[in-house]
Image (tube, coloured by chain):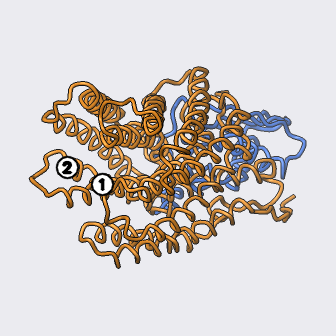
Amino acid sequence: MSVLNSNNAPDASVVKPHFIFSSLSLLILSVMIILADSSFLDAYFNTKIVAITHMAVLGWAIMIVFGALYQLIPVVFETSLFSENLAKFTFWISSFSVVFLTYSFWIGAYATLLPYAASLMFISLLLFIVNILLSYKNSKLKNNSSKFVITAVLWLAITEIIGTLIAFNFMYTFLSEIHLHYLKIHATIGLIGWFLLLIIGVSSTLIPMFFVSHELKDKKLSIAYYLINFGLIALSVNWFFIHQNQFDILFWLSIAIGILFFISFVYDSYKKRMRKILDIGMKHTMLSIISLVLPFALGLVLTLGFGIEQVLIYRVVTVYGFSIIFGFITTLILGQTYKTLPFVIWLDKYKGLVGKIKTPMPRELYSEKIANIHFYFYLLFIISMILGIFFDKLWLIRIGSYLLLIVAVLYNINVFKMVSHKVKTEITNEN
Amino acid sequence: MKTKEEITIFELEVLELLKNVMDPEIEINIVDLGLIYEVNYDGKKNINIEMTFSTPSCPLGETIISSVKEAIKQKHQDFTINIDVVFDPLWSTALVSEEGKKLLGL
């Protein structure tokens, strides 16, 4: 008998707190966006936007990604997580660091609190990285998915090192260039190297699994892997050491073509799918993948310049970051919550009860109606915010921020409905 | 000792019982999904099942195995059930039954 990965699944107590923390972070994030108000129309590096970005990326996205990844390690690596206790410890230190770091940015305490908050964050991410790398060491499976995940984790380490250096530079100035220069590298490596590669790695296993599609061409993933990594390494080396910006367009193109190969892989999976009807999780997922086109179009616009005036450049940068964090990453997370959390809870509650009592289906643990409603509200939020930032319309941004609050409340209702699910002991009478 | 015909009828009955086991993700029973490769009854108290999962890294594998055992034990409590999970041949959509295709909306 083959080794079954469900034996390797971590205890629900490792995964569940991450989902709870993240969904609360989304709620806090929506309130922060309401409070930030016109900051979205200022230069993108103002304290409020930087605080919102870190809350979104760390509190919301990274925490849920950590939880999901702990659950998915057995699927992607075909081995168990190296240490569940280390994962639980990492959760507490990360949670505290996220709040501390976001608060430091929000009040603009760059030279006082930020370096300490960044150091704590650095330690927590390092613990996560160690746990994943040691899990990978035990894995016999070295395929495209695991390659993407491990490379993403290495990029996360680099992102974090740069972030921590920037934070310390506020206290002891030692970097040769201005902060914005390093901020650009930090954000690009974080969003592309960490998030994008991780998402490609995990979704190249999960999307065909959820679509029930087979006989897909792995070669497209290999090409995507090399093109994206080449582009990102070249960009980083250029920005750090060579400073020949005229070559940036080539490196961005390499990344963009790599992404197209990934999108093409997803499209193959979509075309060959056995499950014709898209459930709410896959609806979000498809919207997220399609949304990838916008930031890369904007990335090319920013690289080529087109003689756009500086004020507009700032807005394009804000939309660029917004479209990656909210258009791509958040949409995907909202959807994948419904593909991951119900199974975590279902396995935890019903694993030992199958056949003994009438068990519900995992999708019955949440309200599909609520999930559908927040899908459309979320779509309106994205459209409203992007138009508001582009066309300098504060009223659109305000509408958008309240739409996100509605989404966050609805999403939290579903998450808490799942995590507080109780087993109904209805015995089957088929004997 | 049971006749060959009785054994075949019994094996078909087991297959019917297994139609009560659902794949929780795809929400189709595992027989119509094509996950059951073979059911062998020895004419006494042993049932051997050769089956697969839709993917080798199926996170619900263990749960599906438990469900298979429970589904048979509901009717044949004192039987020994051996389950062999194989990935050769790998499961593919070609193995889904006509009924399964209807359930999937194909």
Q: Are discs 1 and 2 less than 8 Å apart at CB? A: yes
Mark 1 highlights which residue?
A: A320
| Colour of chain B in the rendered structure image | blue
Residue A57 position in % (x across, y down): 48, 50
The answer to which of A408 and A359 lies nearer the viewer is A408
Kind of residue at badge 1: Tyr
Kind of residue at badge 2: Leu
Q: How many numbered tags mark residues here?
A: 2
Mark toward the start of the polypeptide (1 vs 2): 2
Residue A182 position in % (x across, y down): 34, 37
Chain under callout 2: A
Q: Are marks 1 and 2 on the same chain?
A: yes
Residue A293 position in % (x across, y down): 27, 53
Question: Picture quarter containing residue B81?
Answer: top right
* Image quarter hosting the C terminus of chain B: bottom left
Question: Measuring 26% from the left and 71% from the top, which residue is drawn there?
Answer: A392
The label shown at residue A302 is: 2
Residue A58 position in % (x across, y down): 52, 48
Question: Picture quarter containing residue A89?
Answer: top right
* Image quarter hosting the N terminus of chain B: top right
Chain under callout 1: A
Question: Measuring 48% from the left and 57% from the top, which residue is drawn there?
Answer: B101
